Image (spheres, helix red, strand yellow):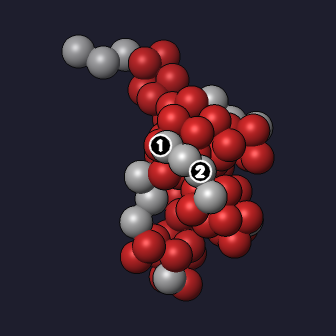
Amino acid sequence: MTGPGEIADAQRHRLEMLDAVYAAIQRRLEVLELVSNSDAPEDALRAVQQLLGVTEQHAQAVLDLQFGRLTLSGVARIERDRERLRAELG
């Protein structure tokens, strides 16, 4: 059974992930340039971490981002999810 503390932790983790993805979308040209100029996936991961100031796990979520999420509706969905989680977390 999942308790309220575990649910809040999962929500915070999801919000941090969405914040990292949203930051990458806002800086998509910089992210794309860093990734495409990286010699290896590990280099791209570190570059994204440094650019966005995020954890390795969050940088990996950025690297796993599909181009379809860059549509206006995809970005709007991310924004709505972020707002909803912020409201739920208070």
Q: Residue furthest left?
A: 1
Secondary-structure class at tag 2: loop
Q: Are marks 2 and 1 in contact (CB under 8 Å)?
A: yes
Disc 1 target residue: 41
Residue 44: x and y, percent? 57, 45
Residue 72: x and y, percent? 55, 84
Residue 89: x and y, percent? 62, 36
Q: What is the C-alpha distance between the residues marked 2 and 1?
A: 7 Å
Residue at point 43% right, 18% down? Answer: 6
Secondary-structure class at tag 1: helix
Foreground of the two, 41 or 30 = 41
Foreground of the two, 54 or 81 = 54
Within 10 angstroms of label 1, few (less than 14), some, or many (20 or more) residues? few
Could one spot residue 58 in this view of the protein? no
How many marks do you count on the picture? 2
Disc 2 target residue: 38
Q: Residue furthest bottom?
A: 72
Residue at point 59% right, 51% down? Answer: 38
Residue 42: x and y, percent? 51, 35
On screen, residue 58 above or below 34? above
Within 10 angstroms of label 2, few (less than 14), some, or many (20 or more) residues? some
Q: Residue furthest front?
A: 39
The amino acid pointed to by label 1 is Pro
- Where, quadrant-wise, is the N terminus in this rendering? top left
Residue at point 40% right, 76% down? Answer: 68
Residue at point 74% right, 46% down? Answer: 52
Foreground of the two, 18 or 39 = 39
On screen, residue 1 above or below 59? above
The amino acid pointed to by label 2 is Ser
Could one spot residue 73 in this view of the protein? yes
